[in-house]
Image: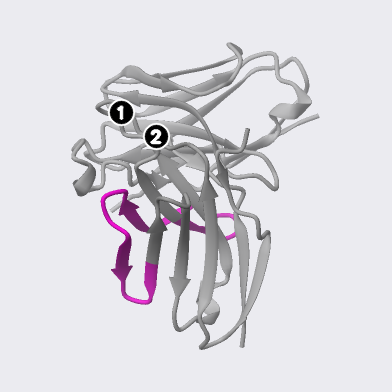
Amino acid sequence: DQQVKQNSPSLSVQEGRISILNCDYTNSMFDYFLWYKKYPAEGPTFLISISSIKDKNEDGRFTVFLNKSAKHLSLHIVPSQPGDSAVYFCAASARSNFGNEKLTFGTGTRLTIIP
Amino acid sequence: DAGVTQSPTHLIKTRGQHVTLRCSPISGHKSVSWYQQVLGQGPQFIFQYYEKEERGRGNFPDRFSARQFPNYSSELNVNALLLGDSALYLCASSPTDSDPDAGANVLTFGAGSRLTVL
């Protein structure tokens, strides 16, 4: 049962354009969402997060949008740069207990920025 | 500052053997989590330890076990290895503050230990 879904395995975007990565979730208990970026031979690196009490969070070129009614979130990268080429994972958690930090990850989207 | 360090980086085992993977968290981090990433999938939660106590366990068989030491480092043990245990094993640490707005769920991952079972 895939509770966090990233339906696009890959995405190619021209340098300078906007990259939009999508994520859907099914568990209504999820209340915190994160995006991680992963380069080959490295561990995932935290990119940006959003709490369920917000619908938008912005950090430089990266913006995450959350639509709770649709159980959908998206990551916007603008402008896209060659260094953004990586696998992007959407993750979610239900912060029910102190110290409970289990993250449920999607399967990832491989983003390729074309120079 | 040193990040999350894991050892070994790569290892090859045969079916039925056991393996021990090690992790040192970021200095000051008291929570350590373990994830398994199979090729083509996202990381899957195995365990979380906080202050040497197990705080969470994922849907993995009892062949998987872990512990956390007084210095907050951690070991993941897998017994009776199966071919399907071949994966990248990721360790992550996080700050002690449980305030969600302070980023309690922002895990910092190590580069992983790649296990191949033949």
Q: Considering only vertical position in the picture, is A80 above or below B96?
A: below
Horizontal relation, residue A6 to residue B103: left or right: right
Tell me the residue at 57%/42% (across/down).
Answer: B9
| Residue A93, image x, y percentages | 39, 39
Q: Is residue A52 visible?
A: yes
| Residue A94, image x, y percentages | 37, 35
Tell me the residue at 52%/71% (across/down).
Answer: A20
Horizontal relation, residue A31 to residue B79: left or right: left
Q: Amino acid at mark 2?
A: Met
Q: How is the image coloured?
A: one colour
A51 is within the stretch colored magenta: yes
Where are the magenta residues, as a range? A36-63
**Chain assignment, label 1:** A
Residue labelled with disc 1: A96
Q: Considering only vertical position in the picture, is B105 above or below B1?
A: above
Tell me the residue at 60%/53% (across/down).
Answer: A6
Rendered image quadrant of residue B37: top right
Q: Nearer the viewer, residue B22 or A22?
A: A22
| Residue B112, image x, y percentages | 53, 43
- Dot 1 and dot 2 residues touching (CB under 8 Å): yes
Disc 1 on helix, strand or loop?
Answer: loop
Disc 2 on helix, strand or loop?
Answer: loop
Q: Amino acid at mark 1?
A: Ser
Q: Earlier in the sequence, mark 1 or mark 2?
A: 2
Q: The C terminus of chain A appears in which quarter of the rendering?
A: bottom right
**Chain assignment, label 2:** A
Q: Considering only vertical position in the picture, is B89 above or below A13?
A: above
- Number of the label disc, if any, that sits on residue A29: 2
Q: Is residue A47 visible?
A: no
In three-dimensional space, the C-alpha distance between marks 1 and 2, rounded to whole angstroms, equals: 9 Å
Q: Nearer the viewer, residue B71 or B62?
A: B62
| Residue A70, image x, y percentages | 47, 52
